[in-house]
Amino acid sequence: MKNYTITVNGTVYDVTVEDKGGSGVSPVTPVAAPKAAAAPVSSGAAGSVKIEAGAAGKVVKIAAAAGASVKKGDPVVVLEVMKMETPVVAPQDGTVASINCNEGQQVDAGALLATMN
């Protein structure tokens, strides 16, 4: 038996695989690994105003790109929380300095999603 640690979408799994020997085993065709998620986008240094997730969920949309001007209440990131889309909004007027998450990423409550100035 062999033990492996596998990470899927940020979740870590410990897996044990049993070797059944060489008889009666058909060859396995390798499958390409999924593309790695794009790195979060930043327009330079992180901003002084943090935009954090209010609840755990999945990032379904990046609504404002780094460098974009936003007004207080404009959506910056949209999370799916308990099967409902929930916008995470700018707390004040300013410019988005960095986006610290990716679409499809699972985030915990309090996770840093973006910064702004």
Image: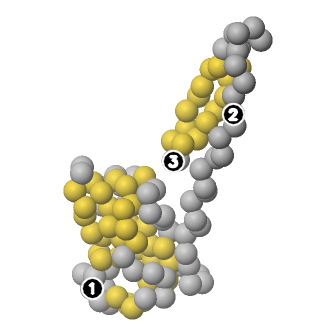
Answer whether labels 3 and 1 touch (C-beta < 8 Å). no
Looking at the image, is mark 2 or mark 3 earlier in the sequence?
Answer: 3
Tell me the element at label 3: loop
Mark whose residue sits in front, 3 or 1: 3
Judge whether residue 21 can be spotted in this image: yes
Q: For the residue marked with disc 2, what is the amino acid? A: Thr
Q: Is residue 53 left or right of residue 30?
A: left
Residue linked to disc 1: 72
Residue 43 lies left or right of residue 4; in this view the side is left
* Residue beneath disc 2: 29
Q: What residue lies at 51% left-to-right and 47% top-to-bottom?
A: 9
Q: Is residue 58 above or below residue 66?
A: above
Q: Residue at x 75, y 8 (%)?
A: 23
The 10 Å Cα crowd at callout 2, few under 14, some 14 to 19, many 20 or more, is few
Q: Residue at x 55, y 75 (%)?
A: 41
Residue corresponding to mark 3 = 9
